[in-house]
Amino acid sequence: MGYRVAVVGATGNVGREMLNILAEREFPVDEIVALASRKSMGTEVSFGDKTLKCKDLDTFDFTGWDMALFAVGSDATKIYAPKAAASGCVVIDNSSLYRYDPDVPLIVPEVNADAVLGYQKKMIIANPNCSTAQMVVALKPLHTARRSSGLWSRPINPCRVRVKRVSTSFGTRPKASITRPTTSPPRNSPSRSPST
Amino acid sequence: MVAETKKIMGKDIKVTATCVRVPVFVGHSESINIETEEFLDEHEARDILREAPGIMVVDKREDGGYVTPVECVGDFATFISRIRQDSTIDNGLNLWCVSDNLRKGAALNAVQIAEVLGQRCLKKG
């Protein structure tokens, strides 16, 4: 038995990627619906081998749906996320709208998966900014490291992290690159062998 | 980035960041300088990161021995390269961190949250 899942903003870069990843990771889905704005109604999007036709977010009834992955801007999220949550559908929101809300957990599963239990307050979970997500994945194992010799009895705790970041304009993946390159040199090299 | 990192990792962590957009199609790159309370050797840090979930260490001291954005496209992993001691402070480490911003930075993380939510809370799958 699986879940009834809605992807909101299914025609956008992130929404399409959500559908790809749900299919790739074989997320237990009983039923999936692609939602978008009215002007994208009927637009076809891929979900694994299947093709879904987008439905109108504005008139969609979230009752009976288990979770909705939101990949729309804060303005649309503000209208539709509370609507979905009030219908008992847990919202996983990619916008910045709820990230700092104390009643909404902000989660990177490798780092603070336990915080997921806090979803019940608002039936909403926030997804962090793209730069934060990858940084905390790198920091967490160093933060909680304990020296195996037992010399340290407490975590190493980075007390200060200075970050210089270079980013792309995110969300602007060109359509041509959706066909992903199958090779990438460093991954094919013996990357896990000891380095000097 | 500052507020989000504190919310996820705890308020004691201090973060400063400068973000710019550059002409790259896909991928975020971060040069991260870390100061820890106690000394952590770069070799030890490399070993810790190799074992950590979601991370792929690509760190060879040779031409191309590190990851650039073009190689992270379509990957789930957060790539870590250039793990080095920062000799200008007592307990300093530097590293280079690259990831596909549409995957770990957005869609993948959302799906991972859905997986955790399903396994721990909704328990239907």
Image (cartoon, coloured by chain):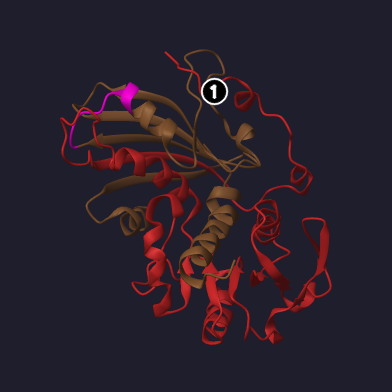
Chain colours: A red, B brown
Q: Please say whether residue B40 is one of the residues in the magenta stretch.
A: yes
User: Majority secondary structure of the magenta segment?
Assistant: loop
Residue B6 picture location, percent across and down = 31, 55
Quadrant in which residue A58 is drawn: bottom right
Residue A59 picture location, percent across and down = 71, 87
Magenta range is B37-44
Q: Is residue B60 above or below residue B125?
A: above
Quadrant in which residue A53 is drawn: bottom right
Which residue is located at x 54 percent, y 23 percent?
Answer: A191
Residue B124 picture location, percent across and down = 57, 70
Residue B1 picture location, percent across and down = 39, 53
Residue nearest the viewer, comparing A132 with B122: B122
Q: Is residue B8 above or below residue A140?
A: below
Which residue is located at x 48 percent, y 55 percent?
Answer: A129
Which residue is located at x 42 percent, y 34 percent?
Answer: B51
Residue nearest the viewer, comparing B63 with A26: A26
Instruction: Say what secondary structure mark 1 lies in.
Output: loop
Q: Is residue B75 above or below residue A53?
A: above
Tell me the chain of label 1: A
Q: Amino acid at mark 1?
A: Ser
Q: Quadrant of the C terminus of chain B?
A: bottom right
Q: Going by the image, does A14 lie left or right of A193? A: right
Q: Please say whether residue A103 is one of the residues in the magenta stretch.
A: no
Q: Which residue is mark 1?
A: A191
